[in-house]
Image (cartoon, grey):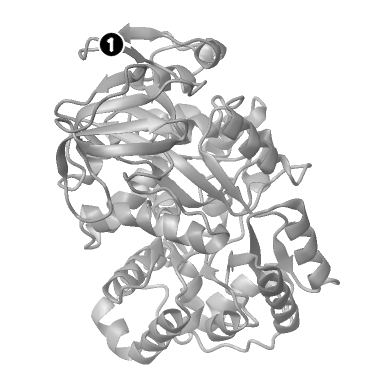
Amino acid sequence: MYTGMTVQETDEQVTGSNRFTILRTLKSHLVLVLTTLVLIPSCAGKSEIMFADAREDPIAFVHVNVVPMTSETILYDQTVVVEGDQIVEVGPSSDVEVPKSAVVIDGQGSYLMPGLADMHMHTNQNWDSDVWPVTPLALYLANGVTTIRDFGPEGDTLTYALQWRDEIQVGTRVGPTIYASGKILFASPLGDPVGEVDMNHHLGFDFLKLYSYLSLDDTRAALTTASRLGMYSAGHIPYPVGLDQVLIYGMDEIAHIEELMPEFIDFDRKQQMAPDEWLGYLIQTGSTQIDLFNAFNEATFSVDHADALEAILTSLKLHGAPVCTTLVIDDVIHHKLFDLPGFLNRPEAAYLPAAYQDSLRSGTEKHQVLFKGIESLAIYKYDFDQWLLRQLHEADIPLLLGTDSGILAIMPGFAVHDELQIMVANGFSPYEAIATSTINAANAVENMLGEGNFGRVAVGMRADLLLIHDNPLEDITAIQDLQGVMAAGRWFSAEALAEIIALPNSTE
């Protein structure tokens, strides 16, 4: 049911719900923040910085309550020492000696947790243009997202995301750590699937993405080549292939929970259709087997389709394949169709590109057109996908927090908190929800590159850290109240975050 909507089709429309009260200063101060160390008094008697770029001196968080995410626990009154981009010491404040040269950040009464990861999002090269009033890379950091995984860049230069990754790493660009796929294997015939995979691997992309419209032969050739090269693969389930076969051929990860919906429909996978014909065919065929245009009945569906669900869960478990969540897609579609005034009145709507706001108001936005007359299908899918989320969770299928932000009007950074709240509303404990964006994300990157050293507050981990006021294991929304963010050892106070996401012409 994924519509295939791209950023180019939507002018990078975004949405989300407001999390911050720090939008007070002018965007023009960004250069000052990036080039200057602004000192403010610290209650520890040392100097605390708004922004630390050089990473020359250690940074110590003292008297802080640590949410290690190595287990569901809180370590009280700890000191965490960071040198460069790594955590080098974690222990009781009474036992840890703070280096004399360290910048001290007093965390008395606050909580220190790992930064969050959005494991399914999309960049666009025009993030460097005036299309966006504030670059989404800054929006991720301001929402505590210190790692992003790009499932398909959009732009004239295929490797721009790799350049951004390198610039962020050396400190000449502000943003989270980036892992990136390259050219998407979108539709057959590919012509030279082996060559396509070789090209992505040669250019240095971190993983390979497959899309919905690949043939059986192209899928097999691409995944066999990726396996030979040791290249991780993730993506949609090609309609002509199906879940079992794509995992047998070696795909490592499923890109969306919603990709599993066609697995409940009996359709002819040997059909040869253009990409724009598949969705209509699946809706038409599926509606003869599933009541797609009336309310989703969980009890009835669970009984009638128990065998299909069991087959899906068995296949995912057998191959150890994680699934990206991306449930916020449905939430955003829901708002666009049924609560447009509320959608546009959300405070962060000021970040929406002007062209997208115009398309919404005129009723010409893609989803408004796509679902016109069949709005009940959007309601069905909204409920169905959350039911499937619960089934995957109960079956202990590894889940990775992803939002698909950058497309489908999903606000970069903000949507991560929407996704967390959707999970908690569907039976996840706060710890379990956070794990999809920390521990599970790190495990996926470990499988992808052999270096998943983040997502936990422990010695040897990359210093991606969030300092917050309250315990996130008690209330998932506590993560939105940021005192500061450390991204790969660089510290941004709340004031610095306000600087980098301040809207142009802001008078606050």
Locate the C terminus and report the quarter of the image it occupies: top left
Q: Residue at x 53, y 41 (%)?
A: 177
Element type at marker 1?
A: loop
Image position, residue 114 (x, y; %): 34, 43
Give whichever of 81, 316 is nearer the camera: 81
Left-right relation of 20 to 173: left
Give the answer, above or below, for where 162 lies relative to 428. above
Give the answer, above or below, for where 25 lies relative to 328. above
Please tell me how crowded label 1 is: few (under 14), some (14-19), or many (20+) other residues with Cα within 10 Å.
Answer: some
Left-right relation of 102 to 478: right
Image position, residue 13 (x, y; %): 55, 40
Image position, residue 412 (x, y; %): 48, 40
Left-right relation of 6 to 344: right
Q: Residue at x 69, y 88 (%)?
A: 270
Q: Amino acid at mark 1?
A: Lys
Give whichever of 298, 238 is nearer the camera: 238
Asked whether the viewer can see residue 92, the reply is: yes
Give the answer, above or below, for where 225 lies relative to 373. below
- Judging by the rendered image, the residue that carries numbered circle 1 is 46
Asked whether the viewer can see residue 15, the reply is: no
Give the answer, above or below, for where 486 lies relative to 309. above
Image position, residue 34 (x, y; %): 53, 16
Give whichever of 43, 138 is nearer the camera: 43
Q: Residue at x 43, y 56 (%)?
A: 441
Q: Quadrant of residue 48?
A: top left
Give whichever of 150, 214 is nearer the camera: 150
Q: Residue furthest right?
A: 191
Left-right relation of 425 to 436: left
Q: Residue at x 46, y 75 (%)?
A: 261
Q: Quadrant of residue 235?
A: bottom right
